[in-house]
Image (spheres, coloured by chain):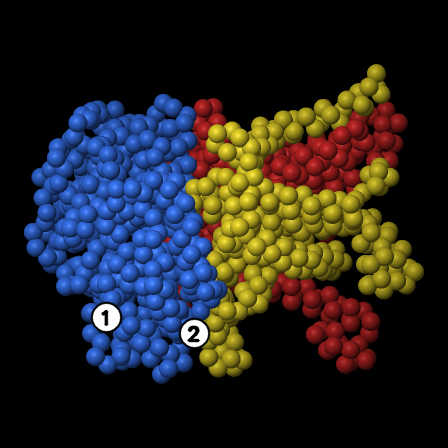
Amino acid sequence: MTAVAAARSPRMNARTWDRVLIYGSAILLALWVLVPFYLIFLSAFSRPNDVFTYPKPLLPTDLSTETMQTFLNSTGVFASVINSIAVAVLTIVISLAFGAPAGYALARFTFRGRQAVQLVILASKMFPVAILSIPLAVAFLRLGLYDNVLGIALVHSAMALPFVVLVTAGVFAGVSNELEEAAMTLGCSRLTAFLRVALPLALPGLAAAAIFTFVISWNEVFASSILTLRQRTLPALVLFALQQSPLYFKFAGGFFMVMPAIVFIFFMRRYLLNLWGGR
Amino acid sequence: MRRSSMRALAAATFAIFITACATTGTSGGGAVASPTGNDTGKDFAFQSTQFSPVPEQEAMRQQILKNWKGVGVEFITDQEAVIINNITAEAKAGGTGRIGIIGLENGQFSSIVAGNYLQDLSKVTDRNKDKKINADMLTLGKFGGSQQLYIPWMQQTYFLVANKQALQYLPSGADVNALTYDQLIAWAKNIFDKTGQKRFGWPVGTNGLIHRLLQGYWYPSYTGGLVTTFKSPEAVTMWNKIKELWQYSNPQSTTYAFMQEPLQSGEVWVAMDHGARLINVLKAKPDDFIAVPAPAGPKGRYYMSVVIGLGIPKTTPNQGGAEKLIDYLLQPDTQITTFRTNSFFPVIDAQMPADLDKGLKLEADAVAKQSSAKDGKVVPLPVGLGSQGGPFNTAILNTFQRIVVKGEDPSTVLNEQAKIINDLLNTAQAKCWGPDGTSTSTCQVK
Amino acid sequence: MWARTEEILPYALLLPSLVFLALLILIPMVQALLLAIQADSGEFTTAYLQRMAVDVNFNDAWRNTLLLIVLIVPLQIVLALAMALLVNSRFKGHQWFLYVYAIPLAISDLAAGILWLAVFTERGYLNTAAQGLGIVDQAKVYLSFENFGGLVAAIVIAESWRATAIVMVILVAGLQLIPRDFFEAADLFGANRLRRTLYVVLPLLRPSLQSALIIRTIFAFQTFAVVLALAGRNMPVIAAEAYSWYANNRDAHLAASYALLLLGLTIVFTFVYLRVLGLREAEVKR
């Protein structure tokens, strides 16, 4: 669309043309992402019975925090947000601690059984978690991990681990091995060469792995609801209930579920960009 | 269950609206004496499939449990599968768990009962005798044995709600309070002919309860049975009627779970559903909607009674505390509060207050008319299916999906689905129930 | 000594992950999979797989699953690549666009289902907008059981919105690792944007594309909340059937059979990706 508009003006030089094309498509894509969020926002902040009106209001002319307040004052919402954050942070730590070394090994070394290991790691992700939960719940009860933040974090870590390994393997594969080898010939041990050379270069990728992990953990419902009872994470507390709640509650809950994750991604964005050496 | 006793249930179920209630039915605690436990002073969780909508959960915690003086009780709602998994996992792990008490629909207890995970509550029934708990519901809670595995907590039914805009299209001569299914079809057709809109709605979405409407309403009303008459000529007639109505039904019905939502948005004008899934639209717009009894078919005006029971798992951390909670939930005041806030009806002989909310009044009147209708007949949710309860619902759902949605030939589908139903009834060794009368051997499609 | 450490090192680095996965996922998974081929008595049987094969929804389930994956995954890769390349061109303000594009990462499939139903339902946002602009004169029903194409289109749109971000993030991270010289060198030779993308960027981006494809496909096989929200029972997919047999029908054997099918199909797809886009050893050592 922008291309057509720009082509009609022959005097526009190539640079401007380029600009319009880039900004035009960037903005179009941004609208595609943002408009649905705007709609959740509108619905979450309309009066309870207004969500049923038709035609629906498309402009924020009559906002109300009534539904949102009822939702936030519901029992357990605050505690479950704390639980969700604790679980997500623990999950990031555990899965990176286990996964990043494995990813490094897959990227750097050729060894017997490498492909088999890759497949095993991937295969563990190919099975619906809901169906694993009963054997896990029994084991966790015996180990005292049932209804426990650490217990859910362990399961979430196991769910996220294959991705962390895959992503970090890709990341380390992209970090030149020659730099590391050069550092080693200059007297660094493999560990210091890794810490000083490979790790800093790999950080953006590791940050990406952390984002995935957070998202997987934040949105996971099945394991969290079966492995907890009172120490609920937010999705386990509200998501099934939301499906069965009045429409206005669905939107309030949906909106609230999205907010903390948006904030988290905001911080990761800064982190990513600082490491790019971009502005 | 014998037909006459089902009539008794019909009378007793909503007797609160008609006359005096039946008396407590159990003949004492039975042969097995159940020990009443001590209150260990431990807090516990109360897990239930009911009250899952957030506002209902809040009403449970803040209003229904308001005068509870015992140990800390945490009310948690979950899907059936999650609760069954939790109870099973706690039982398998041994010792005491975290769940003190569960509140489920009659049918949802079946696999927990099959696993033998529940305490006998006969003693608790005895000490609540003066409350006159509905006798037939107590019998349901025994699952054919001598132990009282759950105690009735509250009840609901399904009925019909219509937007007042639709009333002008009622076929002539039809009494909206005593509809027949033929008139319902004519009504939906008339709306379509006059407005070009398909405004009847079905709860056929993933969380919808269409299978209950078939099991407790359409099938018995047309065939006088459910299992035994599954592929009878009357059943074929019924399916053709449903197909006819489906033509005038909103084609988005396959996304509907709670009919109150499309009713309130105006996508649907006429719909049948579970009372708890209709009450919001009645409360929000009591002047724009009416609630009326379910329609009648050739065999009568069948309707379904939904019983929610309270059970205590053997792994409960505080048996005495959980038993006291049952006593509390059965008190007349608590039962009335439960009706006011969450619209489930009492199971005891309780006096209905006069100052009801307009929407609740609509609901209560519709239910009273339904249970006092001359041709009214009540059936329970499927009984005795154990772990086959879910597959049975699926078999009924698939029959609907194939005949109505996909348009396959009714007799072919009925023959094929009948085999599946017979297999699972054999697995469950279930006797006939409700609309099919009683049987000495396993219930089978004829 | 040094050589010996080098030999053991990869295994030592991998061991914690493998033990962790074995305990939490692989052992329970094997236990669950056995349910598909083993009766309660312990005998091996194909009875459950046969029952699955004649199940009412079986044929629709695998067809719909494959159809949705074939439609959704490539669309997501193209969209994500466009977003990633735009961000990587580092125009002024690109950081904000990266952030915006990454936001859907935060939304769960259950929430996305709720949202898109509000858009596509008869009295929803789409009809409000279409009627407001005069495109339709009466609210249309998009999610009708009679309109399979409409259901598929709605699901593809909703899923492309929800799950493109994860692909985008992997590709942006991958692009960061391509030295700027490559872009500049290509500019110097007068390669235009399209040719530069096709011949310079894409080959270098292959490892990231492979990761993105595999991750996205595995996820796509397992998500079903959006499908259920928009199409109800009219669009059975394998993951939903597995869950439904497990949760609604309490039949672990059939649920495990569907899970086995899911596993099998996912392995086939992954194998193809690894083969077609596979890293050769030389590239690993690059």
Which residue is under mark 1? B179
Residue A120 locus on image (x, y percent):
67, 34
- Element at label 1: loop
Q: Is residue C95 visible?
A: no
Chain identifier for the yellow-coloured part of the image = C
Disc 1 from disc 2: Cα separation = 33 Å
Farthest residue to the bottom: give it. B194
Circle 1: is it few (<14), some (14-19), or many (20+) Cα within 10 Å?
some
Residue shown at 49% from the left, 56% from the top: C228
Using the rendered view, name the quadrant where residue B150 is placed: top left
Amino acid type at image mark 1: Leu
Q: Of C83 and A64, which appears nearest the observer?
A: C83
- Element at label 2: loop
Left or right of B443 on screen, residue A153: right
Residue B46 locus on image (x, y percent):
31, 38
Residue shown at 23% from the left, 42% from the top: B140
Which residue is under mark 2? A55
Left or right of A176 on screen, residue A128: left
Chain B's colour? blue
Left or right of B53 on screen, residue B174: left
Name the chain under label 2: A
Chain identifier for the red-coloured part of the image = A
Residue A101 locus on image (x, y percent):
70, 31
